[in-house]
Amino acid sequence: MKLRFIFTALMLSLALTAAADFRTIVEGYEVALDNVRLPQTESGTIAFKKCSECPYETKRVAADATWEVNGAAMTLKDFRLRMSSLSEPGNRTITVGHHLEKDEIVRVTIWIY
């Protein structure tokens, strides 16, 4: 009985140290579409406000950033075209993925229903 208890305690302690190694690499921000200024070029910058009262934050876009509409990847040009044709941008949310170590935007996603 004691051996089983010691073994269980040892396994739990190993599991706790493994869980402590996790860290956030990409943080996603859900922002209103009308609070986003998309880049003009693939290697440009994007500006967004996390809330309507917050100031704009400007971040560099990674060269290999992913632009997605309903899960389908596309070029920045096509993404900009789709965003310009949407009605009521204030009622739509877009997700901006910020790579914390590189300090770059790596993914921009929107789901249109």
Image: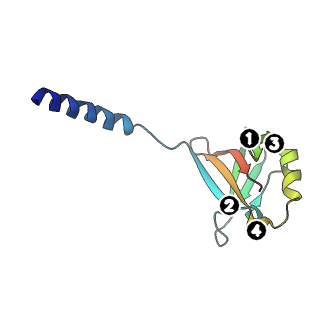
For the residues bearing labels 2 and 4, Cβ distance under 8 angstroms: no
Q: Residue at x 68, y 61 (%)?
A: 31
Q: Which residue is mark 4?
A: 90
Compared to 78, does 58 lie above or below? below
Q: CA distance from mark 3 to mark 4?
A: 25 Å
User: Along the polypeptide, which appears first: circle 4 or circle 1?
Assistant: 1
Quadrant position of residue 99: top right
Quadrant containing the C terminus is: bottom right
Mark 4 vs mark 1: in front: 4
For marks 1 and 3 on the same chain, the one whose residue lies earlier in the sequence: 3
Residue behind mark 3: 42
User: Camera-side residue: 113 or 56?
Assistant: 113
The percent position of residue 82, horizontal first and vertical second, equals: 86, 52
Disc number placed over residue 31 in the picture, else none: 2
Q: Secondary structure at mark 2?
A: strand
Q: Is residue 107 above or below residue 6?
A: below
How packed mark 3 is, by other alpha carbons closer than 10 Å (few <14, some 14-19, many 20 or more), is: some
Cα–Cα span, label 3 and label 2: 21 Å
Q: Residue furthest bottom?
A: 53
User: What is the spatial separation of the Cα atoms under label 1 and label 2, in whole angstroms?
Assistant: 17 Å
Instruction: Measure the C-alpha gap from mark 1 to mark 3.
Output: 10 Å
Residue nearer the viewer, 48 or 18 = 18
Measure the alpha-carbon separation of dots 2 and 4.
9 Å
